[in-house]
């Protein structure tokens, strides 16, 4: 998994160059891995009305859904050249919980303050995600 972790991180780093962030100047890239081995990329897309901004993580997950993925998120790497430890916002964490493998955690891949790649679990950042009993 270590090689895959680095590969996902490098893809997130590369795609961050495509970010549309003219207002905040805070580009972010994300690479989501699903259990079938498919990867989906996303960048943040800002709007002059900040509330309409789409985070890189949700963009990557939206790309997965457009290809038919609705479950099976295994890992997601997030990168910003502006800030180390670019931790996902609450909305993105809830999205990750929505698309993960049933009753499984998601690995979140970030760069620490020293430039090393770290892994965390979704449950560390969002221990009590919203659930709806069907």
Image: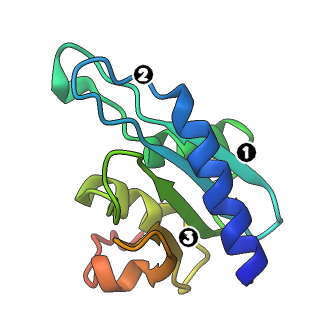
- The residue carrying pointer 1 sits among few (fewer than 14), some (14 to 19) or many (20 or more) residues within 10 Å by Cα, namely few
Residue identified by numbered label 1: 68
Residue identified by numbered label 3: 100
First in sequence: mark 1 vs mark 2: 2
Per the image, label 1 sits on a secondary structure element best described as loop
Q: Residue at x 82, y 64 (%)?
A: 37
Could you give the CA–CA distance between mark 3 and mark 2, rounded to whole angstroms? 27 Å
> Are discs 1 and 3 less than 8 Å apart at CB?
no
Could you give the CA–CA distance between mark 1 and mark 3, rounded to whole angstroms? 14 Å
Q: Nearer the viewer, residue 55 or 91?
A: 55
Occupied quadrant, residue 77: bottom right
First in sequence: mark 3 vs mark 2: 2
Residue identified by numbered label 2: 20
Per the image, label 2 sits on a secondary structure element best described as loop
Per the image, label 3 sits on a secondary structure element best described as loop
Q: Determine the residue located farthest toward the front in the rendered image.
A: 114
Q: Is residue 65 visible?
A: no
Q: Residue at x 32, y 23 (%)?
A: 46
Q: Position of residue 27 (x, y in %)?
A: 39, 36
């Amino acid at each position: 998994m270590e090689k895959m972790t680095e590969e996902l991180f490098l893809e997130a780093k590369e795609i961050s160059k495509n970010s549309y962030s003219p207002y905040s100047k805070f580009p972010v890239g994300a690479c989501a891995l699903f259990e079938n081995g498919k990867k989906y990329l996303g960048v943040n897309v800002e709007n002059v009305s900040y509330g309409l901004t789409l985070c890189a993580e949700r963009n990557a997950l939206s790309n997965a859904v457009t290809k038919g993925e609705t479950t099976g998120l295994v890992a997601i790497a997030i990168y910003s050249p502006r800030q180390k430890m670019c931790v996902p916002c609450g909305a993105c964490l809830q999205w990750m919980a929505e698309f993960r493998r049933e009753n499984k955690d998601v690995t979140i891949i970030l760069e620490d303050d020293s430039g090393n790649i770290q892994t965390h679990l979704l449950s560390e950042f969002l221990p009590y995600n919203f659930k709806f009993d069907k």
